[in-house]
Amino acid sequence: MKRVMRLEGLYDKKTIQLLQTKANTALTFDFRPRSFNFIQQYLFLDFITVLKNSTLPFSIQYENEPDFMIKDTLQKLDAIYSGPVSLEFSDNQKCEYYEQFSRPFIWHYNVQCSDISVFKSPLLKGIVLNYSDIEDAHNKNILTSFVQNFYRLTHDVLLKRNGQLILKLDWTSNVMPTLAEYFDFNVISVPVNSNVEICYRNVDQNKLQSSLESLKNFTNAL
């Protein structure tokens, strides 16, 4: 199965231009202020000039962000870009918070989710599952119940509405060979971090290409 490779936390044009030459690739821009890959709004809007004629899907990731700040970015984005874009949230808000933007959104699965109505939202188009949560469940010998509960909650979005299931990995994650017995992932998502950087916020283009190819070959074999 061919899967999409997604790079999280982009912060420079050169890397975006490189990824535009790669088939089956998606991008995420990180608007979380505490993230090492936080991107300022004006830089992100400048990068859109590179993506205007691209078919690469991309999302904008937020976490506990005031809604007026998200609306401000979307308003400015709409003035210069008419292509598809998804919002992405790694927090635990009420469903109404996510739906107020009237955009398709991706949500990071949270076992402590307090409002399960998020799974019924017609705007929910993708769910991110962190491999560290799967690994933790496996180590605690509760993986089967974890998987059952996950699919009980996500049945509508993944099976009825063909939403994307996104596996969040680190480059060094030791993926269990039986993972494919439990999950069928559409997207493999990895971060821009020290594993593909020369130094802080300075991507090694050759290392990135090599790492993407290695990970793609491995995950496609799952």
Image (spheres, rainbow, N blue to C red):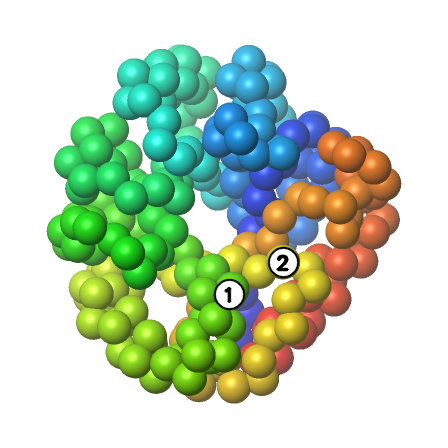
Reply above or below: 210 against 40: below
Q: How crowded is mark 2: few (under 14 residues within 10 Å), some or many (20 or more)?
A: some
Work out which quarter of the rendered image holds the C terminus and state it.
bottom right
Reply above or below: 137 against 194: below
Is disc 1 placed on a helix, strand or loop? helix
- Judging depth in this view, the residue of 124 and 117 nearest the camera is 117
- Judging depth in this view, the residue of 127 and 206 nearest the camera is 127
The answer to whether residue 65 is left or right of residue 14 is left
- The answer, for residue 77, to whether it is visible in the render is yes
Q: Position of residue 147 (x, y in %)?
A: 33, 76
Q: Which amino acid does label 2 sit on?
A: Asp
The answer to whether residue 187 is left or right of residue 161 is right
Q: Do the residues labelled 1 and 2 touch (CB within 8 Å)?
A: yes
In the picture, the disc for residue 170 is: 2
- The answer, for residue 55, to whether it is visible in the render is no
Q: Which residue is drawn at 56% across and 19% down?
A: 40
Q: Residue at x 80, y 58 (%)?
A: 210
Q: Which of marks 1 and 2 is nearer the N terminus?
A: 1
Across the whole image, how many numbered discs are drawn on residues?
A: 2
Hey, which quadrant is residue 36 in on the image? top right
The answer to whether residue 82 is left or right of residue 99 is right
Q: Which amino acid does label 1 sit on?
A: Tyr
Q: Where is residue 75 in the image (x, y as percent from the top left)?
A: 35, 15
Q: Name the residue under label 1.
A: 131
